[in-house]
Image: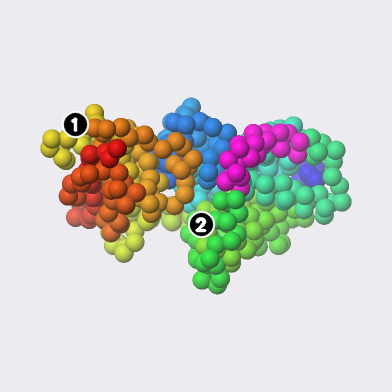
Amino acid sequence: MSPPPPSPASSPPAGLGPRACLAVLTVAAVVRLVLALGTDVYSDTAYYWQWARHLAWGYYDHPPMVAWLIAVLGVHATALVCGAGTVAAVWGLARDVYGSREVAWRAAALWSVVPAGVVAGVWATPDSPLLLFWTLGLWALWRERWVWAGLACGLALLSKYPAVLLGLAFLLAAARARRLPWGAWLTGALALLCFVPVVLWNARHEWVGFLFQLHHGLSGARGGWASLGQYLAGQLALGGPVLFPLALVYAVRGPREQFLLRMAAVVPLLFFGYAAARTQGEANWPAAAYVAACVGVAGMRPVWQRAVAVSSLAVVLVVGSHVFFPVVRLEKDRVLSRTRGWTVLSELATPEKLFPGLDARNVAAIYAPEYQLASQVAYYAGGVTDTAPPARFSQYDLWPQVPLSPGQEVLWVMEEGGPGPPEELTDRFTAMSDAVPLVSELGDRRLHKFWVWRLWGVKH
C-alpha cells in the first residue's frame, strides 16, 4: 500500500521555494486570525455552540465532535487549532509521501490557502475537526500505522459522517494492490468502536441523524443539471479555480504509487457530484478531497504549484477583503450576511429597553423561525431560545420544550421578510405588541433588519 522512500530519480521537480512557502503560510495565518477575530460568530457556528451547551453523543445534523471541541476550546480556538493542526498534518503526510521536507512545505503552503480549508480554519463547523482527523487518518494509512489510523478515522467519523469515504478510498487502493493487510482489520475495528456511541444515540432517537443525512444528501427534490452546475461552480470557488481541475487530473494521471491519495481526492468529489445531481447540496461537502490534491500538486511542475497558490490566495484575499470593505453590492450577499451584523442581537439581553414596562425576569424564552437565528440570539443575548414554525426540524426539536407559567412572556424575533409570530405562539397568549426593529449596518450598507414582538398573558 505505502511505497518505499522515493529514489532521487523519482523525486519531484523543484517548485515553490522556501521563501515563497513561508510567505504563503504567513499570509494565510494572518488572514485566518483577522477573519476569526474581526467577524461575528458564523451563523452555523452559533448553532454548534448551542450543542456545546448540551453535550451528547450525537445531534440531529451531525456527530458530536465539533460540540465537544467548542465546549473545551471555545468557538474561535476550535477552528484555529484544527486549521493549524491540519496544515501541520499535511506537511507530515507530504514529507512521508515524497521523502522530502521541501515538498512538505509546498504542500502545507498550498493547503493553507485552499478556500475550503480557510473557512474551516476560521469558523468552527464539523469540517474543522473532519479535515484534521481525515488528514491524520490518511497519513496513518499511508504509513500503515494501523492503530493510529483506526483512532484517527474513528475521530473523523465522530466529526462528520462523510469520513466513511476515506475508508472507501482505502478499500479501492487495497483492491488495486490486491492486498489487504491484517492490520487494516484492526483499523476498521477501532474506527467502528469509536463510532458505536453515535450509532446508539441514533438508535435511541429513531435514527434521526442518519435519516436526515440520507435525505439531505441524496434524496432531495432539487437535483438535476442546475444543481450539478452549482456544485461544480462551488468547487471552483471553495476548492480553487486551479486546484479543482488539477485534483481531477491528479486522480486520473497521478503517480501509480500514490493511488491511495488519488482515491482520497477523487472519491469525495465523485460521490458528492453524484449527490448534487440528485439534490441541491453544499459546496463545502467534498472539502477533504483537496488535502490529497495539495499533496499531489506539490509534486507537479512548478508552474502548477504557483498557479494554485496564486489563484487560491487571490480568492481568499478578495473574499476576505469583502468581509471588511464590501465594495461590490450583491443582491444576496451570503458572505456578509453570515459573518457580520449579528452583534445587534445583544440588545435583546435588555428587552425592557425595546418594550418599556416589560420585566426582563419574566421573559421565559426568545423564539425564532430558523435554528441559526435562535442560536445567534442565544450567543449574543443569552437566555433560553427555541424555534417555532416555519423552522425546519432541527436539534431544537429534540430538546425539551420551554415550559410556560402564568405571568411569563416570550419574544419572537425574525429577519425582515419573514413571517410574524406563528399561531403556535399567538394562541398561547392573550396579548401581543407591535413589532420593534433592530437594524445592523456596515457603513452605508444595511446588513440585517430584525423585527421583535412581545407576547404576554399566558392562557391557562
Q: Are marks 1 and 2 in contact (CB under 8 Å)?
A: no
Q: Position of residue 324 (x, y in %)?
A: 30, 49
Towards the viewer: 126 or 419: 419
| SS category of the residue bearing label 1 | loop
Would residue 123 appear left or right of 210 to someone viewing this image? left
Image quadrant where one finds the N terminus: top right
Q: Position of residue 285 (x, y in %)?
A: 55, 53
Would residue 418 appear left or right of 230 to someone viewing this image? left
Q: Position of residue 321 (x, y in %)?
A: 34, 52
The residue lying at 29 percent from left, 37 percent from top is 460
Q: What count of labels does the image hold?
A: 2
Q: How is the image coloured?
A: rainbow
**Which residue is the extreme one toward the left?**
356
The residue lying at 32 percent from left, 52 percent from top is 422
| Type of the residue with mark 2 | Glu
Does the magenta portion include 277?
no
Residue identifier under label 2: 282
Does the magenta portion include 194?
yes
Up/down of 238 relative to 65, above or below: below
Towards the viewer: 12 or 166: 166
The residue lying at 24 percent from left, 32 percent from top is 407
User: Alpha-carbon distance for marks 1 and 2?
Assistant: 43 Å
Dominant secondary structure, magenta: helix
Q: Position of residue 145 (x, y in %)?
A: 75, 34
Q: Which mark is residue 359?
A: 1
Picture quadrant where residue 454 is located: top left
Q: Which residues are magenta?
A: 188-210
| Type of the residue with mark 1 | Asp
**Which residue is the extreme one toward the bottom?**
225
| SS category of the residue bearing label 2 | loop
Towards the viewer: 167 or 35: 167
The residue lying at 34 percent from left, 49 percent from top is 424
